[in-house]
């Protein structure tokens, strides 16, 4: 049976209002907040919502703006960060850090509004004053998480050292194999004079009919079946060393992600609070832009509904 709230939404075509507001919202965080909206008869809440939208509208009128299109709802990730031994993925860490970064940017705007704002914006300041300062928190992560989902060498001295060793080992293996390939090419044994990788091990392509002439381990064949990929005996130990280094690199990456996740967990509550504030801020921007485009005016609320003292 429909509740009174459901009847109110239908009579007011509130779902249509939500749909219109969603068109002005660019992030998952803001869209979630808009979908939570429902009609209210709480005079204090109504007055506060109108005041926030009015102040943000004035901010837009002065040329101000604030983008939050990249923000996602990270509530579940923050919960995961608090599980002992959990390690968030790099992409997940970046999503959470985006919240902290945008919160710092908005906090700076809210606490230092443009001088052109008539009367300031007390409602926006009150909304934003619960935001934590994430400057030091973000500094630990700066430059360590890359957009392609990998860790920068600067993530730790040990990671940088391992990657240097890995590159050195790769060069040595490739040099050994190129020398070996030149020798085989003279007898027409190899299909192509190139070095490739199969299962993190460097191999060479050999014609199927010539594979018995190359002592080594077969690591598969081409789709045509005319070529096999062989790891010569001469480079097995070198490849073993490379695999060992790669395993150490993966272990170091996991250790770094564990440390980063723990740092996230220590700030989980302030980050969740920041997400809630940013969601509300995006709602107010959506309302203000909607009001601007549809030439809306702020309604005059009767005394019975107004929370302002006489």
Image (tube, rainbow, N blue to C red):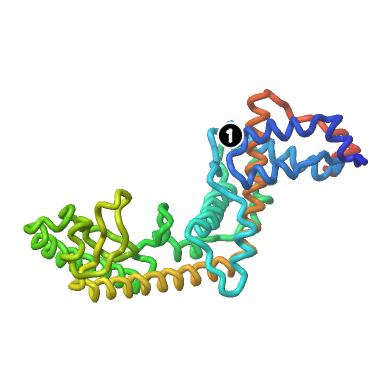
Furthest residue toward front: 209
Q: Residues within 10 Å of mark 1 (few under 14, many from 20)?
A: some
Q: Quadrant of the C terminus?
A: top right
Horizontal and vertical percent for residue 123? 69, 46
Furthest residue toward left: 186
Q: Residue at x 64, y 27 (%)?
A: 292
Horizontal and vertical percent for residue 300? 81, 30
Residue at mark 1: 60
**How many discs appear?**
1
Residue in front for this viewpoint, 236 or 13? 236
User: Quick one: SS at disc 1?
Assistant: helix
Q: Which of the 4 image quadrants contains residue 49?
A: top right
Note whether 168 is above or below 69 in the view shown. below
Q: Residue at x 49, y 65 (%)?
A: 136
Q: Quadrant of the N terminus?
A: top right
Horizontal and vertical percent for residue 11? 86, 30
Residue 42 in view here: yes
Q: Which of the 4 image quadrants contains residue 23?
A: top right
Horizontal and vertical percent for residue 7? 89, 35
Q: Residue at x 87, y 40 (%)?
A: 5
Q: Is residue 253 left or right of residue 281?
A: left
Note whether 167 is above or below 31 in the view shown. below
Q: Residue at x 32, y 71 (%)?
A: 243
Residue in front for this viewpoint, 300 or 253? 253
Q: Is residue 263 left or right of residue 281?
A: left
Q: Is residue 100 left or right of residue 231?
A: right
């Amino acid at each position: 049976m429909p509740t009174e709230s459901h009847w109110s939404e239908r009579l007011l075509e509130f779902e249509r209002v939500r749909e219109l507001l969603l068109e002005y919202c660019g992030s998952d965080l803001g869209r979630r907040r808009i979908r939570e909206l429902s009609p209210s008869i709480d005079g204090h809440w109504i007055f506060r919502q109108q005041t926030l939208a009015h102040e943000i509208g004035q901010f837009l009128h002065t040329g101000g703006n604030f983008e939050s299109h990249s923000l996602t709802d990270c509530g579940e990730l923050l919960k995961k960060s608090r599980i002992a031994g959990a390690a968030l993925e790099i992409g997940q860490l970046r999503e959470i850090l985006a919240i902290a970064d945008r919160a710092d940017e908005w906090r700076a705007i809210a606490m230092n509004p443009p001088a052109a704002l008539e009367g300031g914006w007390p409602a926006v300041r009150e909304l934003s004053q619960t935001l934590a300062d994430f400057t030091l928190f973000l500094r630990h992560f700066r430059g360590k998480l890359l957009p392609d989902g990998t860790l920068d060498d600067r993530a730790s001295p040990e990671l940088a050292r391992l990657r240097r060793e890995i590159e050195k080992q790769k060069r040595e293996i490739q040099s050994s194999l190129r020398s070996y390939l030149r020798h085989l090419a003279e007898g027409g044994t190899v299909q192509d004079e190139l070095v490739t990788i199969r299962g993190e091990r460097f191999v060479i392509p050999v014609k199927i009919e010539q594979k018995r002439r190359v002592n080594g381990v077969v690591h598969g064949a081409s789709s045509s079946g005319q070529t096999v990929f062989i790891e010569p005996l001469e480079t097995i130990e070198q490849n073993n060393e490379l695999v060992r280094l790669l395993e150490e690199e993966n272990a170091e990456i996991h250790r770094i992600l564990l440390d980063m996740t723990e740092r996230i967990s220590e700030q989980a509550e302030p980050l969740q609070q920041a997400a809630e504030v940013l969601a509300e801020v995006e709602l107010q921007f959506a309302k203000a832009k909607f009001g601007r485009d549809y030439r809306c005016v702020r309604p005059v609320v009767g005394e019975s509904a107004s929370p302002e003292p006489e």
